[in-house]
Image (cartoon, rainbow, N blue to C red):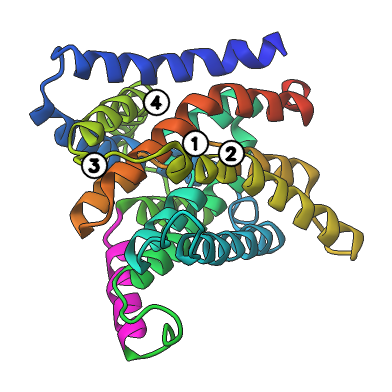
């Protein structure tokens, strides 16, 4: 267990530094979007390009692992939305937009900013293959579906109509504008073709990729502080803690269960790849969902508290799950 904490502590520690630096005014709020842009459009794409270029295509796109991860993502989204829409004895459920963002924050792990450096640091570079497959599913399927549902009216019934399909098309166009899938695709193309970048350009990519880990983790903390500053309403504990626990505990357990069942049914499931997927699901919620919630006019206070609760609790829950699955010896 101490070996797991030795890996996870620095990563979560840098997140805390980013939060404290922003809270103390060392990092002005106006700088936070710039940090986020640097990571999303420059540093992280270069890191994913390098991983994609260094792995055989079959290790990046494993149909069995992607199918398991995608099926669990769909189940998580639909069940989270159903929970959000359900009326409770204490009052009505949330609206369709907030239910969809609750599903997104309960299903979308922080695999890009945190998962890539953390899992590769813990399990070695071969973890990049299954992790990249999971990132593609979340960027193309999970986020597009949740954003499309968030923009539809009326809620249930009537989701599958022109309104939803139009919103889904817009969400997919938004996913296509994300640089991460393109960086992965270009890296895979480079590996398949055997073409390498010219020396000076490769050095630029390497320098930006090396900056991805510390800046991404620091940015998570800064984004969480900024999102909290823009939260204007109070959210009771019952409004965000259950979804945080759903993200940290139910999501990884669901993937593990699907993987074991698929393997028992004769499907070829890589034990190491399944371990990577389970640990990916055990990551805290993606911090950028708070920015999306603010942009789309959802209940940003609720989303922010889910992300913050999952990030704080994940230091313990992720480490415990990694230890229970033997991640400290999987490398």
Element at badge 1?
loop
Local packing at callout 1 (Cα closer than 10 Å; few below 14, some 14-19, many 20+) is: many
For the point 42% across and 54% down, which residue is it? Answer: 102
Element at badge 4?
helix
Q: Nearer the viewer, mark 1 or mark 4?
A: 1
For the point 58% across and 31% down, which residue is it? Answer: 119
Q: Are marks 1 and 2 in contact (CB under 8 Å)?
A: yes
Q: Is residue 81 above or below residue 45?
A: below
Q: Is residue 160 above or below residue 78?
A: below
For the point 69% across and 24% down, which residue is it? Answer: 320
For mark 3, what is the residue? Answer: 233
Local packing at callout 4 (Cα closer than 10 Å; few below 14, some 14-19, many 20+) is: many
Q: Nearer the viewer, residue 20 or 275?
A: 20
Tag of residue 247:
none
Q: Is-magenta flag for residue 57?
A: no
Alpha carbons under labels 4 and 3: distance apart: 33 Å
Alpha carbons under labels 2 and 4: distance apart: 22 Å
The segment highlighted magenta reads: 163-178
For mark 1, what is the residue? Answer: 284
For mark 4, what is the residue? Answer: 213
For mark 2, what is the residue? Answer: 248
Alpha carbons under labels 1 and 4: distance apart: 16 Å
Local packing at callout 2 (Cα closer than 10 Å; few below 14, some 14-19, many 20+) is: many
Q: Nearer the viewer, mark 3 or mark 1?
A: 3
Q: Are marks 3 and 1 in contact (CB under 8 Å)?
A: no
């Amino acid at each position: 267990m101490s070996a797991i904490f030795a890996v996870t502590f620095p990563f979560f520690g840098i997140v805390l530094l980013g939060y404290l630096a922003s809270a103390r005014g060392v990092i002005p709020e106006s700088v936070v979007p710039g940090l986020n842009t640097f990571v999303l459009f420059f540093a992280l794409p270069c890191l994913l390009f390098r991983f994609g270029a260094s792995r055989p295509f079959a290790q990046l796109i494993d149909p069995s692992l992607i199918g398991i991860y995608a099926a669990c993502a769909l189940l998580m989204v639909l069940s989270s939305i159903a929970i959000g829409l359900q009326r409770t004895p204490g009052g009505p459920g949330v609206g369709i937009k907030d239910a969809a963002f609750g599903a997104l924050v309960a299903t979308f792990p922080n695999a890009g900013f945190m998962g890539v450096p953390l899992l590769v640091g813990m399990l070695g570079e071969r973890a990049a293959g299954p992790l990249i497959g999971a990132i593609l599913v979340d960027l193309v399927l999970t986020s597009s579906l949740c954003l499309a549902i968030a923009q539809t009216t009326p809620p249930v019934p009537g989701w599958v109509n022109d309104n939803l399909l139009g919103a889904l098309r817009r969400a997919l166009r938004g996913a296509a504008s994300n640089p991460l899938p393109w960086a992965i695709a270009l890296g895979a193309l480079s590996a398949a073709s055997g073409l390498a970048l010219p020396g000076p350009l490769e050095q630029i990519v390497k320098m930006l990729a090396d900056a991805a880990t510390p800046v991404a983790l620091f940015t998570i903390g800064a984004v969480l502080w900024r999102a909290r500053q823009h939260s204007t309403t109070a959210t009771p504990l019952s409004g965000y803690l259950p979804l945080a626990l759903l993200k940290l505990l139910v999501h990884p357990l669901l993937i593990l269960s699907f993987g074991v069942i698929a393997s028992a049914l004769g499907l070829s499931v890589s034990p190491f790849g399944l371990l990577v997927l389970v640990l990916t699901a055990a990551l805290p919620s993606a911090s950028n969902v708070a920015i999306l919630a603010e942009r789309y006019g959802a209940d940003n206070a609720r989303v922010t508290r889910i992300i913050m609760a999952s990030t704080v609790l994940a230091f313990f829950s992720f480490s415990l799950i990694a230890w229970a699955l033997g991640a400290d010896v999987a490398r």
